[in-house]
Image: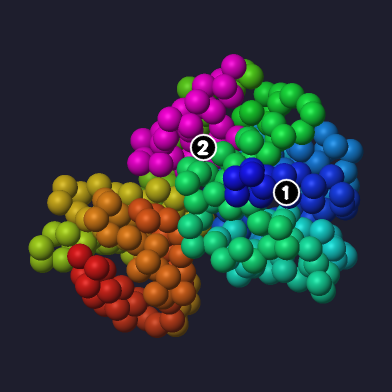
Amino acid sequence: MQTNERELLNAVAFIKEHDDFLVVSHVQPDGDAVSSTLAVGWLLSCLGKKYTMINEGPIPRRMSYLWHADQILNLSETSPGRTYKYIICVDCADFQRVGETKNCFEEGALILNIDHHPTNDAYGSVNLIRPQAAATAEILFDLLLAFDFPLDVDAATAIYTGLLTDTGGFRYSNTTPEVMRIASKLLEYGVDGPGLSEKLLEQMTFSQLKILTRALNKLERTEDGRISWVSITDEDLAECGAIHEDLEGIVNYPRNVMGVEVGMLFKVINDRAVKVSMRSAGNVDVAAVCQSFGGGGHTRAAGARLEGTLDEVVARVVERVKEQL
């Protein structure tokens, strides 16, 4: 039996054998994290299992159309008031990515870890990890089909959303023939592909446009033009009336500059911490760069949190990227 098949069967057994689950994804959830959470919730509801979905913070407003999106608890506003023995983590590259939701785990909790990040350290009691998958949602497509009931448009829309967002609208290098095969199948379930593309990839709020403008006014690059970056502070967000989810996609702009090998977004967390998001044109493994700073991700898309002022962090990270180039 192949490893992937064995992992899939182990995940199926974990779900069938237990009940009363807590489903969590990573802090500051993106499209794949939210859709994967809801796909698991949909599966558990079909099985008649008890479950609670939670995240450390709010889910992006643009994901509100998804099945039961309003049932994902925001831990910063409300707590389930109890702990759970059986946990399903989706799209969390390492255990720390679950954030404060770990406080809802019982001591000795059993974890099903479903993820597609190559830097995942297999922290689960059961691990279903496929680095070759474009999104965690791609893995969940196979998991849902392993049970004895058909998908419906709600489940298909959740899976499609994860694929669409993590492949950049089927434009990134992780858009494999398998991804397109799955997407085609999901359209047969009634998914509104063009509508989702418009909602998730084209439409922008006024605050998004303002913070993008602010970021681009700070665009910098190295002398050779191979590294480019922008930076954002809390003051920028406040003055633009923007929130964290409005930053999604900004990192692609410095990366898209002709001649740039690595594009980066630096987000100031506080006076002594900065988060960096990186995108690579392919010649630099930004996951390795971010791992050297305690972060992780994919070869072409990764991130990390670093201690220091903005100027200090920018200097350290740019120097590290130069070494990789």
Figure check: 91 above or below 204: below
For the magenta stretch, what is the residue range?
Answer: 159-188
Figure check: 70 above or below 93: above
Queried whether the magenta region covers residue 184, the answer comes back as yes
Q: Residue at x 37, y 56 (%)?
A: 299
Q: Residue at x 54, y 62 (%)?
A: 120
Kindly identify which numbered label has been placed on residue 11.
1
Figure check: 178 above or below 267: above
Quarter containing the N terminus: top right
Whether residue 202 is visible, yes or no, is no
Of residue 74 and residue 85, the one placed in the foreground of this image is 85
**Residue 310 screen position, x and y as percent:** 35, 76
Q: Residues within 10 Å of mark 1 (few under 14, many from 20)?
A: many
Outermost residue, front side: 1
Queried whether the magenta region covers residue 3, the answer comes back as no
Indicate the secondary structure of the residue bearing disc 2. Answer: helix
In the displayed structure, does residue 59 sit left or right of residue 251?
right
Q: Amino acid at mark 1?
A: Ala
Which residue was labeled with disc 2?
A: 163
**Residue 136 screen position, x and y as percent:** 57, 46
Kindly identify which numbered label has been placed on residue 315.
none
Q: Residue at x 77, y 58 (%)?
A: 87
Q: Amino acid at mark 2?
A: Leu
In the displayed structure, does residue 271 sit left or right of residue 25?
left
Indicate the secondary structure of the residue bearing disc 1. Answer: helix
Of residue 225 and residue 5, the one placed in the foreground of this image is 5
Of residue 301 and residue 67, the one placed in the foreground of this image is 301
